[in-house]
Image (spheres, rainbow, N blue to C red):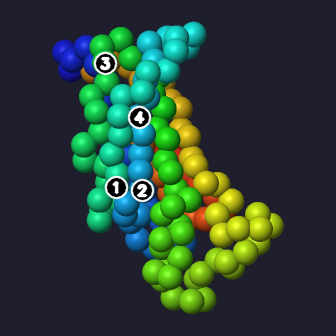
């Protein structure tokens, strides 16, 4: 049993359209203490070559909710020519009229003191999935 009075958060991103980690995605972290409290921006980081954010800011004591904001549009614009095999590529233009349907992904989740929350993002230009990892 942990004796910490704060929760901790980590994340990583996998680009499922290319079958590899998503490098260089800006990630911002915000927290609040209670569902009626204002969000407090804590800072951010960017994913490394393994798609991981290794230096997200610590959560303040009393945090009950966390929000991770992923700026994914710039990543897909940079990665457009670095996809896997051509047969796996998504069309450059689809219903969105652009190459990326979701320019940002915001994930909000509840935390409890003393626990670690790893929140992976599985990403492609037209969808995403997220879960509590380990």
108 lies left or right of 30: right
Q: Tell me, for residue 47, which label it has, or none.
A: 1
Between discs 3 and 1, the one toward the N terminus: 1
Between discs 2 and 3, the one toward the N terminus: 2
Image quarter hosting the N terminus: top left
State the image quarter where residue 42 is shown: top left
Q: Is residue 28 above or below residue 24?
A: above
25 lies left or right of 124: left
The CA distance from mark 1 to mark 2 is 5 Å
Residue extending farthest bottom: 86
Give coordinates of residue 18: x percent, y percent: 49, 75
The CA distance from mark 2 to mark 3 is 24 Å
Q: Are marks 1 and 4 in contact (CB under 8 Å)?
A: no
Q: Is residue 45 above or below residue 67?
A: below
Judging by the rendered image, the residue that carries numbered circle 2 is: 25
Q: Tell me, for residue 29, which label it has, or none.
A: 4
Count neighbours of disc 1 (C-alpha within 10 A) and say few if under 14, some if 14 to 19, many if 20 or more.
Answer: many
Judging by the rendered image, the residue that carries numbered circle 3 is: 60
Q: Nearer the viewer, residue 17 or 92?
A: 92
| Residue ID at (49%, 21%) | 39
Which SS class for mark 1? loop
| Residue ID at (21%, 17%) | 4
Whether residue 133 is visible? no
Give coordinates of residue 123: x percent, y percent: 53, 59
Residue extending farthest right: 95
The CA distance from mark 3 to mark 1 is 22 Å
Q: Are marks 1 and 2 in contact (CB under 8 Å)?
A: yes
Q: Is residue 11 above or below residue 64?
A: below
């Amino acid at each position: 049993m942990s004796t910490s009075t704060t929760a901790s958060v980590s994340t990583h991103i996998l680009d499922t359209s290319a079958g590899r980690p998503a490098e260089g995605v800006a990630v911002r972290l915000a927290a609040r203490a209670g569902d009626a409290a204002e969000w407090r921006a804590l800072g951010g980081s960017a994913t490394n070559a393994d798609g991981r954010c290794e230096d997200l800011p610590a959560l303040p004591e009393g945090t009950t909710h966390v929000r991770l904001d992923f700026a994914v549009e710039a990543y897909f614009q940079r990665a457009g020519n670095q996809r896997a095999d051509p047969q796996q590529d998504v069309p450059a233009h689809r219903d969105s009229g652009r190459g990326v349907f979701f320019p940002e992904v915001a994930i909000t989740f509840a935390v409890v003191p003393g626990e670690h929350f790893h929140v992976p993002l599985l990403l492609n230009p037209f969808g995403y999935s997220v879960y509590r990892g380990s």
